[in-house]
Amino acid sequence: MDEQALLGLNPNADADFRQRALAYFEQLKISQDAWQVCAEALAQSIYSDDHIKFFCFQVLEHQIKFKYSELTEVQQQLIRETLITWLQAQMLNPQPEKTFIRNKAAQVFALLFVTEYLTKWPKFFFDILSVVDLNPRGVDMYLRILMAVDAELVDRDVVHTSEEARRNTLLKDTMREQCIPSLVESWYQILQNYQYNNSELTCQCLEVVGAYVSWIDLSLIANERFINMLLGHMSVEVLREEACDCLFEIVNKGMDPIDKTKLVESLCQVLQSAGLFSIDQEDDVDFLARFSKLVNGMGQALIASWTKLIKNGDMKSAQDTLQAIEAKVSLMLQLLIHEDDDISSNIIGFCYDYLHILKQAIMLAVMKKLTYDEEYNFENEGEDEAMFVEYRKQLKLLLDRLAQVSPELLLASVRRVFNTTLQNWQTTRFMEVEVAIRLLYMLAEALPVSHGAHFSGDVTKATALQDMMRTLVTSGVSAYQHTSVTLEFFETVVRYEKFFAVEPQHIPTVLMAFLDHRGLRHTSPKVRSRTAYLFSRFVKSLNKQMNPFIEDVLNRIQDLLELSPPENGYQALLSSDDQLFIYETAGVLIVNSEYSAERKQALMRNLLTPLMEKFKVLLEKLMMAQDEDRQMALADCLNHAVGFASRTSKAFSNKQTVKQCGCSEVYLDCLQTFLPALSCPLQKEVLRSGVRTFLHRMIICLEEEVLPFIPSASEHMLKDCEAKDLQEFIPLINQITAKFKTQVSPFLQQMFMPLLRAIFEVLLLPAEENDQSAALEKQMLRRSYFAFLQTVTGSGMSEVIANQGAENVERVLFTVIQGAVDYPDPIAQKTCFIILSKLVELWGGKDGPVGFADFVYKHIVPACFLAPLKQTFDLADAQTVLVCIIFFFAFTLIAMWQTEGKKNNGHVVLMVDLSYKENTLFFLNGVVVWLLFTCCSTVFCSSPMLKIKLENCRFENLTLTCITCKLTLSESERIGSSSLGCLGFSCDR
């Protein structure tokens, strides 16, 4: 070889020599026989310079890697012999080669192995073992060659072509068949021979075991003799780090989950008995980093086993594995909080996976506990059943919390349980089928979306829910013979009604389930009742998508719409309350259809005519009935008929009014049919209640068309009425007043005093002192009366009151003052002050009724201050003080200022007579005066002032001092002033 060029291999050589060496290396690579010179130099140890030796191995490496197929059999044999000769020389040399030379040699051996093992050198490892025997230097090279071979075959950091990948797979398979057991035996012998006297070789061997265990038969390593030896190394300080890594690779190897759990637990028992589970901050940090990695591997291996066992349905083994995992949590936390970050970071994988299975475990527990037990009585639910329903609600809250933490996990868990159960629902117990559907139902709240859009947005979630809903409606599970499953089915399809906008082809299937023996005609009254409500919701939610099925559905529910008279003795499928939903559903189908107005009118008439005909017949029977029970039964039936007709009107909206649908005439006919019931002297309370409710609906639906019927109806409802009748009648008048305002002014003026006389008459009726029910009825009627006055004044119709004559007006006003001051009812007081404020605003000017200004000063203003002086006035109640007093008193006084203040140069002048203590404004327990004028100063553009004139004062030189601004108001000044910001005055006497 070119000796001058070889000088450039020395790291200390100058640039020229290094450049020459590089050029020489390139020359040798393309030379046909230069590799032989290098082989000869290595075999005969011609050169002692380490860099030249390394150079020779590089030349051989290039030849084997890129030009080996060009060599003859003899030349290939020469390379094999060269390497074996060099290997033999290593055991005789006085000094071992440098590490980098040994590593390069191992790489060349590995390349030759990959090239020739399958064809020309099947005894590769046996030949090497026969050379090295147990010689320490030979063992060192043997172990390095093994690591280089593993790197060539398994290293995932190296990108292999598909051809190389197939070759490597074949090499590993062949090794498993031919030599791996022998190699494993050699490792055991090396460990046994050198574990006490050569830690370096022992660690190298442990590294080899850890590398190969991932792709060889685990039983060759995971056996008693190997594991015991490895565990023994854990107590040897110089070996324990490599032993940790080796054990980590063993537990990381894929195997049967039950066997994996047993292996990990056996390792843990020995490690714990050796005291390794007690972590000391002062322990060797490098070892703890490796140990933390091992614990992390064991924890993750156990979790992987638990997951497989759960998936396989082996719950007992899964529970054992879960207990094994939980036993490692304390150790995991010790390592996690260690002050060294490397130790802590190595355990994070176990922490994360443990949290994941903890969530899974809780989810599985919740799913299990949601399940009904065999003893649950569905037909006669008692206290135990009620407790379980409440317990279910708590479990739902827990599931919702889990969904916030891990929505994907919850969705996947529910999907797995749901699909598994519904695949075999025919042979599965009812409680398991019910809870599977229930979980799907609960996902709607656990995974909330805007406006129920579960089938758009997140593709993964939408697809999963859509798949489950499709399974639900096509599986036939609606036919399951248990009420809990049936109800859960209907609850779920209604909750996910937007699914049918995505897949409308399933609507007929679900409609049939609602309409046949599975739903509205189920044998269980409980199912029929709930289904009636759910069917109404389902139809309303689908709206236009129901168009193809409208007439078919109306025909199928015809028998469910029949009004059942009390004398026929037939037990109807649905109760009257349930029929309300069916009538509403029928109305929705008709109103929301795409039919013409004429067709809608015809359908609505077909729906309501049977009710009107039955109503007439039943009313005649009621008029002739003598038995009170029969009277009550007939009245109830009549009330139901009115209620059904009223319920159909709920289908109309601003977009689909009664007029637009052409149905006004039908409902006017209903009005003419129902109103005669008001003149029936029997069961008045029941009949009036039903007709009154219908009138409320017609005011909304028919608008002005209902007005001709109101006077007659009102006249009948005011006859022989009681407190409750009046209390329920007044909201009807309020509705009419607020909606039609001046249109009904003549009617209101005509019925105003008759209504008030009826109210006063009832309020003046004597009642027993302890009759709480009568007292409450009167209180509620009094509130309704004041609400009526508020509606009249608030609707700009104060002339209705003003036109009732001075005496009647005064009487009405005094009742309002009385309500504001004397009745211990904050709600009524609040209403009264609103009325007074409005009247001051409307009548406070010169156009107001004669004498109203005097009434304001003599009665309204004192009322503002007398109310809080009452013993029944609760100053401790914040709402009473803030809402009923401060705001409304101030509002009243502001209104006064706006109407009267201009006459007094922008001031409100209060003429206060102090002659009588009970009328004084300035004594509250003789000490503090409250003039509640807060929040007023912003109303006026100029500085607001309040002037108080004192008359008939019984004290000479009386001085009042403001408790906020400390200004004084003395009698000798006669007229004093203070800003409206003052809260009160204290008296010097």
Image (spheres, rainbow, N blue to C red):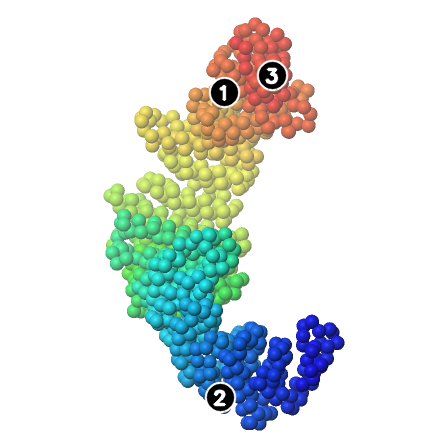
Tell me which amino acid carries mark 2.
Trp
Q: Earlier in the sequence, mark 3 or mark 2?
A: 2
Tell which of 553 and 525 is nearer to you: 525
Residue drawn at 71 percent across, 73 percent down: 13
Q: Is residue 200 left or right of residue 63?
A: left
- Dividing the picture into quarters, in which one does residue 493 lie? bottom left
- Callout 3 environment at 10 Å: few (<14), some (14 to 19), or many (20+)? few
- Dividing the picture into quarters, in which one does residue 28 lie? bottom right
Q: CA distance from mark 3 to mark 2?
A: 114 Å
**SS for dot 1:** helix
Q: Which mark is residue 121?
A: 2
Q: Which mark is residue 966?
A: 3
Residue drawn at 69 percent across, 71 percent down: 12
Q: Where residue 147 sits: x, y (%)?
A: 50, 75
**SS for dot 3:** loop
Residue 469 visible to an observer of this rendering: no
Q: Which residue is mark 1?
A: 866
Q: Is residue 526 left or right of residue 599?
A: left
Q: Which mark is residue 976?
A: none
